[in-house]
Amino acid sequence: MGIRKIMSSALVLVLLGGLSALRGQEPAQPPELLIRCDDIGMCQAVNQAVETLLAAQIPFSASIMFTCPWYQQAVDLLRDHPQIAVGVHLTINAEWKNYRWGAVAGWQCVPSLVDSNGHFFPSRAALFAQEPKLEEVEIELRAQMQRARQSGLRIDYVDYHMGSVVSTEPLRQLVEKLAHENGWAISRYLGEQDIKSMYAVPQAFKLDTLIQVIGRLGSAQPNLLVCHIGMDTPEMAAMIDLNTFGLAEMSKHRQAELQALISPSFKQACIAQKVRFITYRDLAERMGIENMKRPPQL
């Protein structure tokens, strides 16, 4: 009778499994986490944070600002880590007081994008008040993409600093055209689900917020976590965001994001949730850039 009971129980399990399959109920998949670190190459303090994150061996995607003075150091760092997916952080703003940058194409080629000193405008409002010409935006974005290609790094995707280059329908079409020409993915075009950012969370609560986010990850689609890491150095502490949404003590906020990512608690939370880390290279190869779909909002 014991054997019959075991066989009967096994048969029930088989039948239940068959019914689940018929109903389309797939076994739960481990959640996927795609970490995108923005503003790489902006300054040395950000690049130092990248070194720290690389040492922690956490897979991530690095969005480089090829307009900024420290981009070459970022290139040198990432050249030795080909497993990191690299993106072009398309940039037509320079938001920091006393630390500004301008067009890769040269200010003479894109006069509607720069101020009297040849610097990008600090905010989207200030930029669009100048009625920037679409053809000049194209000239500048092509120049940034060319610099990225010439860096020797493998480029996997593009995204957008402060959202400026996707702020209007013509600009979105331009970014889509240029990404298609280069065979690169576009961030948020591959079905990613944005999860809560740590950006505006008070410094003392960034780690707790991150752990709570990990505990609520869904498995239906890749989960995108956009991060802004840095080191609380005198260089970064002196940088003041000219945008109204800019954070006081920005350098401390960025270091707190970095510390959250490399903390043992974050690692343990990911292990507990069986989180699978992916990069934009992984996602683009799996989905196929030909299958990208424009999200309704960016």
Image: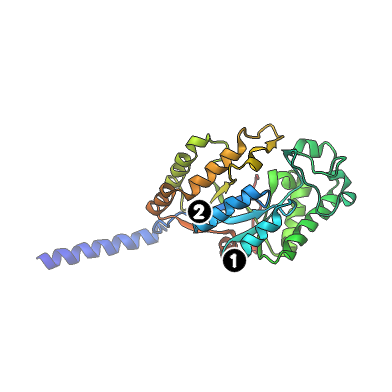
- Estimate how packed mark 1 is, as few (under 14), some (14 to 19) or many (20 or more) residues with alpha carbons within 10 Å: few
**Left or right of residue 145: residue 19:** left
| Secondary structure of residue under mark 2 | strand
| Secondary structure of residue under mark 1 | loop
Residue type highlighted by circle 1: Pro
Residue 75 position in % (x across, y down): 67, 60
Decide which of 155, 20 is in the foreground and name it.
Answer: 155
Closest to the camera, between mark 2 and mark 1, is 1
Residue at (59% x, 59% y) in the render: 280
Q: Which mark is residue 82?
A: 1
Residue 284 position in % (x across, y down): 60, 62
Residue that numbered label 2 is attached to: 33
Decide which of 49, 186 is in the foreground and name it.
Answer: 49
**Left or right of residue 257: residue 270:** left
Residue 66 position in % (x across, y down): 73, 54
Q: CA distance from mark 2 to mark 1?
A: 19 Å
